[in-house]
Image (cartoon, grey):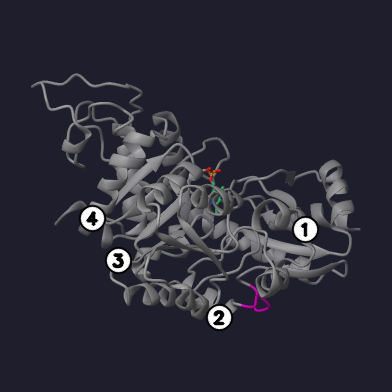
Amino acid sequence: MTTTDRNEARGLQTIAVHAGEPPDPTTGASAPNLVMSSTYVTNPAAGFSAHDLDEDSGFIYTRWSNPTVRQLERKLCALEGAEACLCFGSGMAAASGLLLSVLSAGDHLILTDTNYAGVAEVGRDTLPRLGVEVSLVDTSDPQHIADAVQPNTKLIWLETPANPIMRLTDLDAAAQVAQAHPSLRVAVDSTFATPVATRPLDHGVDYVMHSLTKYIGGHGDAVGGAVLGARDDITALRLEAGIHYGGALSPFNAWLIMRGAATLPLRMRAHEESATTVARFLEDHPKVMRVMYPGLPSHPQHELAKRQMNNFSGMLTFQVENGPALADRMASELQIIHYAVSLGHHRSLIFWMDTASLMATSFRLEGHQLESYRAYAGKGMFRLSVGLESGEDLCADLERVLG
Ligand SMILES: *Cc1c(COP(=O)(O)O)cnc(C)c1O
């Protein structure tokens, strides 16, 4: 039985605690060591080419691979049911590393038209500048994906639930579109879902990307990213994006993120419980026009959410009559929830997302694609990352500013 087989038979909570973290063979240390060394004494003198490297090679240089980072990579593999994982210094390093190493000039990318703003901007500015053709597609309808495929389409990039509007994409349907074209691969940014909610590789997707800064790290104190997939794909990614682009994860951050990941299943359950309480409170509130939470029957894709997500996570959005004015009040009057960007932390975070300004800076949508965005976001919405505080206290904090 391999380590992976053994992990498959265990519960997710056990995997989260133990995978990648055997006791240290030389000291017996029960908790993982933090290995900060940048270089490793090599004896016998070994080859020096990154091309000679595989997952079982000894350690040579920390940008290539590091014992603590490798422990986190093994834990993430076990959580996602993946063969291999490569960690990066941030979610954006993971996303751009994957996009730039898979795509070449002349290739075509199908990119979801609404997703994390940084990736959206790489897709609209950087990739076309490098000669990659990009089609922006509302992937919530799989037919739109199928219609966008061209002979030179190399990659479909999805994000579900999509930041910031909580719109979902059906991963089974998207993978099915790709299966009809042998050289077409599918990548999904699964940061909002986490492996607790959805394991995209089980749905036939080729690559899963995470910002570890969010739920997996979970405590708002370490920036990191990861890409998971088949061994050959991740070996190629390590060589090009990891070693040559060089966006390596700090071992210290890996150590912090590993500690966070150990409690991911427990935290996700608590995030979901408090988010459900807050979502229902907001839905009943006379000043709130619309709440978007995949766990509410009012979410337009609630049926898909039930099929594809084992946990509805802690992310929700809501719309009010005068968002910008309320945002000002929140920034000065909220007592528990922090008015701040980012998400997935144990502290609740809220931020106003103005549709017109996001269209100008990041999404630039028109016609039916703008309408689809507005169906979820209106003129703008508050994105609330419900933390691990008591749900009732969060409702009271919101009631104070909603009035
Ligand atoms: C935050 C985020 C990213 C970027 O991750 P960083 O760690 O901030 O670089 C990418 N995708 C999603 C969905 C995110 O929420």
Report the amino acid beneath label 4. Thr
Q: Nearer the viewer, mark 3 or mark 1?
A: 3
Left-right relation of 115 to 237: right
Q: Is mark 4 within 8 Å of ligand 1?
A: no
Q: Residues at badges 2 and 4 in contact (C-beta under 8 Å)?
A: no
Q: What whole-number distance in Å separates the C-alpha atoms at marks 3 and 1?
A: 37 Å
Callout 1 secondary element: helix
Residue 13, image x, y percentages: 39, 55
Number of residues whose C-alpha sits closer than 10 Å to that of mark 4, classed few (under 14), some (14–19) or many (20 or more): some
Q: Is residue 315 above or below residue 307?
A: above
Looking at the rendered structure, which numbered label has been put on residue 4?
4
Report the amino acid beneath label 2. Glu
Residue 149, image x, y percentages: 43, 73
Please identify the dominant SS of the magenta region. Answer: loop
Q: Image quarter for residue 242?
A: top left
Report the amino acid beneath label 3. Ser
**Who comes first in sequence, dot 2 or dot 3?**
3
Q: Nearer the viewer, mark 2 or mark 4?
A: 2
Q: Image quarter for residue 163?
A: bottom right
Q: Magenta segment range? A: 296-300
Residue 144, image x, y percentages: 52, 77
**Who comes first in sequence, dot 2 or dot 1?**
2
Left-right relation of 84 to 295: left
Residue receiving disc 1: 356
Q: Is residue 335 above or below residue 377?
A: above
Q: What whole-number distance in Å separates the C-alpha atoms at marks 2 and 1?
A: 30 Å
Report the amino acid beneath label 1. Ala
Residue receiving disc 3: 183
| Image quarter in which the C terminus is found | bottom right
Residue receiving disc 2: 303
**Can residue 400 be seen by looking at this rendering?**
no
